[in-house]
Image: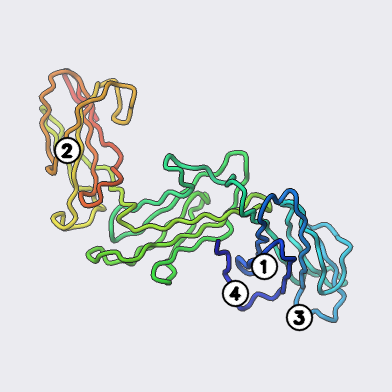
Amino acid sequence: MDLIYVFAFYLALLRVREIGALKVIKPNVVALEINGNPMEQKTTVELSCGDEFEDAEIHWRKNQHNIAARGNSIKVSIEAMLGGNFTCHNASGELLNHTLVLVSPLDFEKAILLQNDNKEFVTCLARNYSGPFHCSWKWDPVRNGVVVFYRALRNSSVLNCSLDKDNGGLTCENLQCPFSEEVTRINLTLLVRNQYRLEEHQRAFFIHDIIKPEKVDFIKAENNEFAWEVPKMWNRPCTFFPLRYEVKVVSHRKDCDDSSHDRPDSFYLNETHYKVSNKRSYTFCVRAQDTFTNKVWSDWSQHKVGKTKSKK
């Protein structure tokens, strides 16, 4: 695991015994890496308020509670995953500096995020080859998770990313030319915590691995004839970025993604139109996929047709 993101302006010097490795995550935030069962370990960490406070009278607090330690440099014990926010203060109680100590258990099963259907903790999708991509995750409902750090790299260049307001995902700009061949993957690092437990999640992918077109829009749905448009955000020209489509007809009482009905016959085509021979009420379904990758399908677009009238 690579948790080393060293910042030159980080003031505090920290040292640990050899059973744990301390990594700087960002200014004033560090991770104590623990091998084995952290519940059975106790690690001594040395904290420093800062070189400029060497001769000052320093008092310390842990999670806003006074502790007995005094002086510019102190030793504290980190037991199990009971890290904390350590603050140093002068004689009058003024805050001088702080260090958030998190515990990163290297051998423990992940517990802060939930896995998706593909056994991944982070899901990334792109609507085309030239726009932004979005990565999302789901928090374990019994844990109050917080994003500590995120970064996406390509060719050692940091991509411009922004965290969603609900902390459930992030959007990154894709600077790759859509007409050029991808030769390097995007490497995403996500660090999350629950209380003082830290977890690291990594994803490495090409944009063509995460392409998922938008839903198609119908431009015609009458007399059992259907026509639809290429998704608005899809790259043009379509001859260079071709799509293929899956169409199927299911019971009018069912939706396209309902798996409870009998397996319908699916048809695959490159055209954006189709004629249904069914005379009964039905639901017409269509979705799109990148022809070159044959990976993620778009969500279904559907149109319900009754015996005497049709409606979306």
Q: What residue is shown at x 50% (from left), y 49% (from top)?
A: 168
Judging from the image, what secondary structure is the residue with disc 2 in?
A: strand
Is residue 194 left or right of 224 when viewed as pictured? right
Helix, strand, or loop for circle 3?
Answer: helix
Image-based side of 210 in relation to 152, left or right: left
Report, in whole angstroms, how far the alpha carbon at label 3 lies from the one at label 2.
69 Å
Task: Report the Cα–Cα distance between label 4 and label 3.
Answer: 16 Å
Q: Which residue appears at 30% of the width and 45% of the height?
A: 296
Contact between labelled residues 2 and 1, with CB atoms less than 8 Å apart: no
Residue 259 spot, x, y in % from top left = 33, 26
Is residue 171 shown above or below 141?
below
Label 4 – label 1 distance at C-alpha: 10 Å
Inspect the image, locate mark 1, and give the three-letter code of the amino acid beneath it: Asn
Disc number placed over residue 51 in the picture, else none: 3
| Residue identified by numbered label 1 | 28
Which of the two labelled residues, at mark 1 and mark 2, occupies the earlier sequence position?
Answer: 1
At mark 1, the secondary structure is loop
Could you tell me the amino acid type at mark 2?
Tyr
CA neighbours of label 3 inside 10 A, class few (<14), some (14 to 19), many (20+): few
**Mark 1 and mark 2: Cα distance apart in space:** 55 Å
Of the residues tagged 1 and 2, which is closer to the observer? 2
Residue at which label 4 appears:
7
Name the amino acid type tagged 3: Asp
The image quadrant of residue 141 is top right
Whichever of labels 4 and 1 marks the residue nearer the N terminus, that label is: 4
